[in-house]
Image: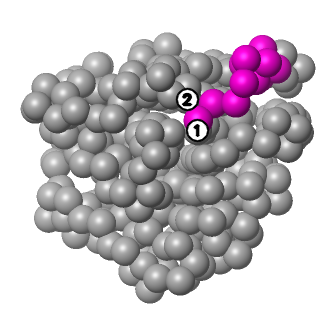
């Protein structure tokens, strides 16, 4: 059985963060492990706005040392790291243990909003995490921040951003464009340093998509653990998330969760 690891924040609603990652890992028949970097809650009195309580970096380090003491996982991903010191600790441990198949989900902003959660982490992610990434999975807002291009409003700008992010060291880049440019198709742009692939799926008009970004990166991680090529892992992850959104359900008056079992429910097996 392949082992997979998420280094990420905890979402108490179970829809995003490491909870979404662990659900995804199991759907792909991998054994998921986790190091908690922060606890994310939502304030019901303020339109369910996000609040973040970070875990002390030395505790993150202790968690990772416990995990790596049993050997390297087949693949790992980072999500919300919450603190510049934590990013440094993660880089230190990854340099020491030298795991393969590193997926960097550079969590800087909530999907669907222009509000930046962790903008102070941008430069540290650029210099410490992107150089060791086998693939990074920014959404449009995060890609605009990481590349320094700001708001990305065209396909050519997305391509430009992908090239810049690749130059920071990431071997592969996939920018999640979603439904930003077309009300019929969701577009993700994959770049391997030489050429682009354009991954499309029909738009699902729903608010039940909480956790989709975390799940996408986790599905790529599990695909890599199972020996898939990077592009194949991305394609499967996109199909996995598409079906998960289609089967999503409301959580409260403001958002709904995706259903991680949808791909399996539809007769697919992920190994």
Instruction: Pinpoint residue 252: horizontal percent, then vertical percent.
Output: 29, 19
- What segment carries the magenta color? 64-74
Q: Nearer the viewer, residue 229 or 165?
A: 229
Q: Earlier in the sequence, mark 2 or mark 1?
A: 2
Q: Nearer the viewer, residue 263 or 271?
A: 271
Asked if the residue at tag 1 contacts the one at tag 2, i.e. Cβ–Cβ closer than 8 Å, the answer is yes
Residue highlighted by disc 2: 4
Using the numbered discs, state the Cα–Cα distance from disc 2 to disc 1 in whole angstroms. Answer: 5 Å
* Mark carried by residue 218: none
Colour scheme of the picture? one colour
Q: What residue is drawn where x is 36% and y is 57%?
A: 232
Residue highlighted by disc 1: 75
Secondary structure of residue under mark 2: strand
Specify few, some or many for label 1: CA neighbours under 10 Å numbering under 14, 14-19, or 20 or more.
Answer: many
Q: Nearer the viewer, residue 96 or 151?
A: 96
Secondary structure of residue under mark 1: strand
Residue 182's quadrant in the figure?
bottom left
Q: Quadrant of the C terminus?
A: top left
Residue 132's quadrant in the figure?
bottom right
Residue 64 in view, yes or no: yes
Instruction: Pinpoint residue 164: horizontal percent, then vertical percent.
Output: 65, 77
Instruction: Pinpoint residue 41: horizontal percent, then vertical percent.
Output: 55, 19
Q: Looking at the picture, does residue 88 appear above or below residue 131?
A: above
């Amino acid at each position: 059985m392949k082992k997979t690891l998420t280094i990420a924040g905890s979402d108490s609603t179970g829809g995003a963060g490491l909870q979404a990652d662990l659900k995804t890992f199991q759907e792909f028949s991998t054994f998921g492990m986790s190091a908690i970097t922060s606890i994310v809650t939502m304030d019901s009195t303020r339109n369910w706005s996000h609040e973040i309580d970070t875990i002390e970096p030395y505790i993150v380090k202790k968690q990772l040392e416990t995990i790596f003491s049993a050997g390297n996982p087949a693949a790992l991903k980072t999500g919300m790291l919450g603190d510049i010191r934590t990013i440094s600790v993660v880089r230190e441990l990854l340099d020491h243990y030298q795991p393969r198949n590193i997926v960097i989900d550079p969590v800087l902003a909530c999907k669907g909003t222009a509000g930046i959660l962790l903008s102070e982490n941008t430069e540290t992610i650029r210099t410490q995490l992107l150089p060791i990434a086998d693939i990074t999975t920014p959404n449009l807002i995060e890609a605009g921040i990481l590349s320094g291009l700001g708001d990305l409003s065209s396909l050519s700008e997305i391509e430009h951003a992908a090239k810049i992010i690749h130059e920071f060291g990431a071997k592969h880049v996939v920018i999640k464009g979603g439904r930003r440019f077309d009300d019929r198709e969701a577009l993700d742009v994959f770049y391997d340093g030489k050429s682009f692939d354009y991954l499309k799926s029909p738009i699902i008009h729903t608010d039940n998509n909480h956790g989709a970004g975390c799940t996408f990166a986790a599905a790529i991680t599990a695909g890599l653990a199972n020996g898939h090529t990077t592009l194949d892992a991305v394609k499967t992850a996109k199909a996995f998330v598409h079906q998960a959104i289609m089967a999503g359900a409301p959580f409260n008056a403001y958002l709904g969760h995706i259903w991680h079992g949808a791909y399996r429910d539809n007769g697919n097996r992920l190994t």
